[in-house]
Amino acid sequence: MKIAFFSDCYLDLTGGIVSSINAQKAALEARGHTVYVFSTSYPKSPKELKALAKQNIFPVPSCKLCFRGLTPVSRRPGIIEHWLLTEHPEIQQFDVFYIHYESGCSIAGLRLGRRFHIPTVQVMHGREDMGEADLIPFGFRTIVATLLNWFHSWYLSHPIRVRRDNYLADTIAKAKMWTMMVNHANSADLVLAPSQHFLKKLIHYGVTQPHQVFPNGFPDSKSPIDPPVKVLSPGEELKIIWHSRVSNEKRLLPFLEALVHVVGKYRLDVYGDGNALARAQRFSKKHHLNVVFHGNVPFKELTGAIAGSHLDILVSYNYDTFGMTLIEAEAYGVPVFFCDPDMKEVVPAGSFIMSKDRSPASMAAALNGLINNPEQIEKMSRVMLAHRCEILISNRIVQLEKIFDSIVSKHK
């Protein structure tokens, strides 16, 4: 089968979407499929372009000066479509277009799929309503959300209008972002979501196209062969690891506030970068916290750090739709800590601790309870190790193949 990925979040980036695409691309190719990836990108030299082309990865026309945060921004969908048909006319003969994200490159993939009668599968990865609220200053959120909707509706129709409510669209800006997300999803032939809780939210706001859950997987090649059970001895330092973005929506600062009230020995290693890094460093220094900031490191170094930890944390709330951090911990048998009840869907029961709410006080209480009962670490680690094979991409890619086979057959 010939499969074309389209994504506005891939090249020059790190994070859950990138990890998901890499794992799925490698697994599909290992099973004999042809996979192209088209992505926005920072400017590349001829040598870099040639190296990417050998992997069937192709940067689409992207803005040279305008970047959304740290993310490359594509040119207009019409420009991308023209470039694709000029440089890669062979994609007209592909079997399926696999779309990730909701911006220019992704829009181009949906439009070309419709034009050439190629089935399109749209993966809804993230909460763009929360992302916009985090990245855009307060006074500009409604303006930016309105402009994004206007741009999006030029290329894909918006028959559904999400109105402000008391659920997730509690501001005009958030309602407009949900409008964009739902109409984008409904432009595809099939909608995938990484978790049941996120799919329910999409359906609530108007996704009507065929839909199902397809969870992300961990690469077999990066999975340890026989990771040991994690054990925390009484009085031993609790080794905690953070390896999400250091950004506002991930809530590192509230977790640092919780550490101020932790009684007992601990060490927090923070891997990653983001818009909250400088504030987190200042707060840690001011309160004399036992926190070490490592910045972005190679994945091999990160996995070694995960393997050497007792507890992995993801303390976002009402934001993450899946949480790749959690299954990365599961691959190494490391227990996890989170605040959001939705994350209970991602890891097996008995493998995590969860605070009563998202407040620093509740997080501190949960951590103090763990330090006072260190035997919980071994119990949770054993549960993780018993289920770790379930998250491997080699097991999950079979489901994705069936999804592609089904939609191609129906389309024909």
Image (cartoon, rainbow, N blue to C red):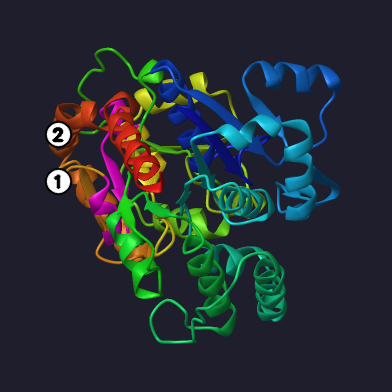
Give the residue at x 39% y 28%: 306
Position of 26 relative to 41 (above/below): above
C-alpha gap between disc 2 and disc 1: 8 Å
Q: Is residue 207 left or right of residue 108?
A: left
User: Mark 1 and mark 2 in contact (Cβ < 8 Å)?
Assistant: yes
Give the residue at x 52% y 59%: 249
Q: Position of residue 227 (x, y in %)?
A: 26, 17
Q: Position of residue 77 (x, y in %)?
A: 73, 54
In primary-sequence order, the first of circles 2 and 1 is 1
Residue range in magenta is 329-346
Give the residue at x 79% y 36%: 86
Crowding at label 1, few (<14), some or many (≥20) Cα neighbours within 10 Å? few
Work out which quarter of the rendered image holds the N terminus and state it.
Answer: top left
Work out which quarter of the rendered image holds the C terminus and state it.
Answer: top left
Q: Is residue 392 visible?
A: yes
Q: Amino acid at mark 1?
A: Ala
Quarter of image, res 257: bottom left
Q: Is residue 340 visible?
A: no
Q: Is residue 386 left or right of residue 60?
A: left
Q: Position of residue 294 (x, y in %)?
A: 58, 32
Quarter of image, res 134: bottom right
Which of 7/403 is in front? Answer: 403
Q: Which residue is mark 1?
A: 349
Task: Check if residue 334 falls in the magenta segment.
Answer: yes
Position of 45 relative to 169 (above/below): above
Q: Amino acid at mark 2?
A: Val
* Label disc, if present, on residue 383 of the rendered structure: 2
Asked which secondary structure carries label 2, the reply is helix
Crowding at label 2, few (<14), some or many (≥20) Cα neighbours within 10 Å? many
Q: Position of residue 380 (x, y in %)?
A: 17, 37
